[in-house]
Image (tube, rainbow, N blue to C red):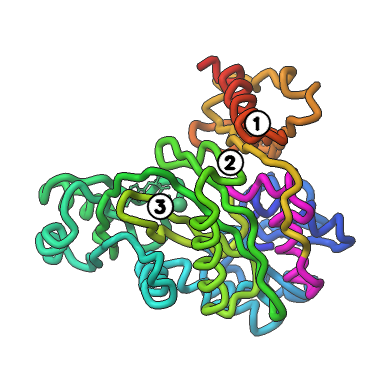
């Protein structure tokens, strides 16, 4: 596993449960996945000696973050199986490429209207085209709302572009979102399965809460699931793929995709027959896909470092309730905005699950 964060950690747990051994490559020690892995190679992703070692020890590799250097994937794939492969990764790494891909392959759920800005001289015309308010997003390396700026005027757009050091960006309309949803697909060379749609609530650009199933009409669920499946098929994707959609008064828009398990799919650990991480391990190891069926409605809430406030929150209210699952990632230092863990509440009544999750979160955050 390239990358040692919480996604790598949950992959490691799933793979080890299936009887595999896991090596993590990650420059930082300690790291959430490295604490559980059979071996943690502490090295940069550009260190060929470490990649050689990984290639000797492992039969297959995946990655847990989208910004994984393409050269590392390229180097490894000449030695061992790497999934997802370099081509789908290159699409998911670029907002421009993924928008173009969605325009072409899923026109029923098109990307938010956008313009490419490779040069400051393109800003005035792009702003004119897209209309304000709009959002400037770096083409690459953005996550958790980073590398984004809401802009209202030409001056603001130019200032934001300069702040991003003039790297290529997309400018897109800021839409009036009714709801945000995501779909997780797992695909191998034989079949593609999709999970129930999750409905997502963000705070400050970071995912706060996911409810599954989403509170949207069945026809809309089928439509976004179909779109995500089409994207996975068109990419000839082998792995777990997450696709985010915006619900607006003007229809459904593709937002972005991630070439890996996704925060909005953490509910699958507690609420589905096979989790998104188990699928990732199965696909990597050539096992048949697991069953994505959800057995109980679920609500997931992220626990960010903000909750720590100098000391670890008191988990007592969560510990006695069998319908509440607490997941902590083993991170020592709690920083604002840092994902430290999540909680998941299960209840046959989705509204009751949501109310309970919100109540528990309020207690933790003294909201
Ligand atoms: P990230 O890679 O940080 O997840 P996103 O493009 O998904 O980047 O943006 C993060 C969040 O910001 C979205 O989930 C959504 O809440 C909000 N957002 C992004 N783009 C738009 C948009 N065009 N209109 C309205 N809200 C947006
Ligand atoms: Mg996103």
| Residue shown at the point (33%, 58%) measured from the top left | 138
Which of pointers 1 and 3 lies earlier in the amino acid sequence? 3
Crowd around label 1: few <14 · some 14–19 · many ≥20 (10 Å): many
Question: Is residue 287 one of those drawn in magenta?
Answer: yes
Residue picked out by circle 1:
353
Quarter assignment of residue 125 = bottom left
- For label 2, being within 8 Å of ligand 1 is answered no
Residue picked out by circle 3:
246
Crowd around label 2: few <14 · some 14–19 · many ≥20 (10 Å): many
Question: Is residue 56 one of those drawn in magenta?
Answer: no
- For label 1, being within 8 Å of ligand 1 is answered no
Residue picked out by circle 2:
211
Q: Which residues are magenta?
A: 263-289
Q: Is residue 346 visible?
A: no
| Residue shown at the point (46%, 72%) measured from the top left | 91
Pointer 2 and pointer 1: residues touching (CB < 8 Å)?
yes
Percent position of residue 294, x then y:
72, 50
- For label 3, being within 8 Å of ligand 1 is answered yes
Residue at disc 1, secondary structure: helix
- Return the residue nearer the eye: 225 or 145: 225
| Residue shown at the point (67%, 66%) measured from the top left | 193
Q: Is residue 268 left or right of residue 27?
A: right
- Return the residue nearer the eye: 139 or 252: 252
Residue at disc 2, secondary structure: strand
Quarter assignment of residue 165 = bottom left
Q: Is residue 59 placed above or below 31 in the rendered structure?
A: below
């Amino acid at each position: 596993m390239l990358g040692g964060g919480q996604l790598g950690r949950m992959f490691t747990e799933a793979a080890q449960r299936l009887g595999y051994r896991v090596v993590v490559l990650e420059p930082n020690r300690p790291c959430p996945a490295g604490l559980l892995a059979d071996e943690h190679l502490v090295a940069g992703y550009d260190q060929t000696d470490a990649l050689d070692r990984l290639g000797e020890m492992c039969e297959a590799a995946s990655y847990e973050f989208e910004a994984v250097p393409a050269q590392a994937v390229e180097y490894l794939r000449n030695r061992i199986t790497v999934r997802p492969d370099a081509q789908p990764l290159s699409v998911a790494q670029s907002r421009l490429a993924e928008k173009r891909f969605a325009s072409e392959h899923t026109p029923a759920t098109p990307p938010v209207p956008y313009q490419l800005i490779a040069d400051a001289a393109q800003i005035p015309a792009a702003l004119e085209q897209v209309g304000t308010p709009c959002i400037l997003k770096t083409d690459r390396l953005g996550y958790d709302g980073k590398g984004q700026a809401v802009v209202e005027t030409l001056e603001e757009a130019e200032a934001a572009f300069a702040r991003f050091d003039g790297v290529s960006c997309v400018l897109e309309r800021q839409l009036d979102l009714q709801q945000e949803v995501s779909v997780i697909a797992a695909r191998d060379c034989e079949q593609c399965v999709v999970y129930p749609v999750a409905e997502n609530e963000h705070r400050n650009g970071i995912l706060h809460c996911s409810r599954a199933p989403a509170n949207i009409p069945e026809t809309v669920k089928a439509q976004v699931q179909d779109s995500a499946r089409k994207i996975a098929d068109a990419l000839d994707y082998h792995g777990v793929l997450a696709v985010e959609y915006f619900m607006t008064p003007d229809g459904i828009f593709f937002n972005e995709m991630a070439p890996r398990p996704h925060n909005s799919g953490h509910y699958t650990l507690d609420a589905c027959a096979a989790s998104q991480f188990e699928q990732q391990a199965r696909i990597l190891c050539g096992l048949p896909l697991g069953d994505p069926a959800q057995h109980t409605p679920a609500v997931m809430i992220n626990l960010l470092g903000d909750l720590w406030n100098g000391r670890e929150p008191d988990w007592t209210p969560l510990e006695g309730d069998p319908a509440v699952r607490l997941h902590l990632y083993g991170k020592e230092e709690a920083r604002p905005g840092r994902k430290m863990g999540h909680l998941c509440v299960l209840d046959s009544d989705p509204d009751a699950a949501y109310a309970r999750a919100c109540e528990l979160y309020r207690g933790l955050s003294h909201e």
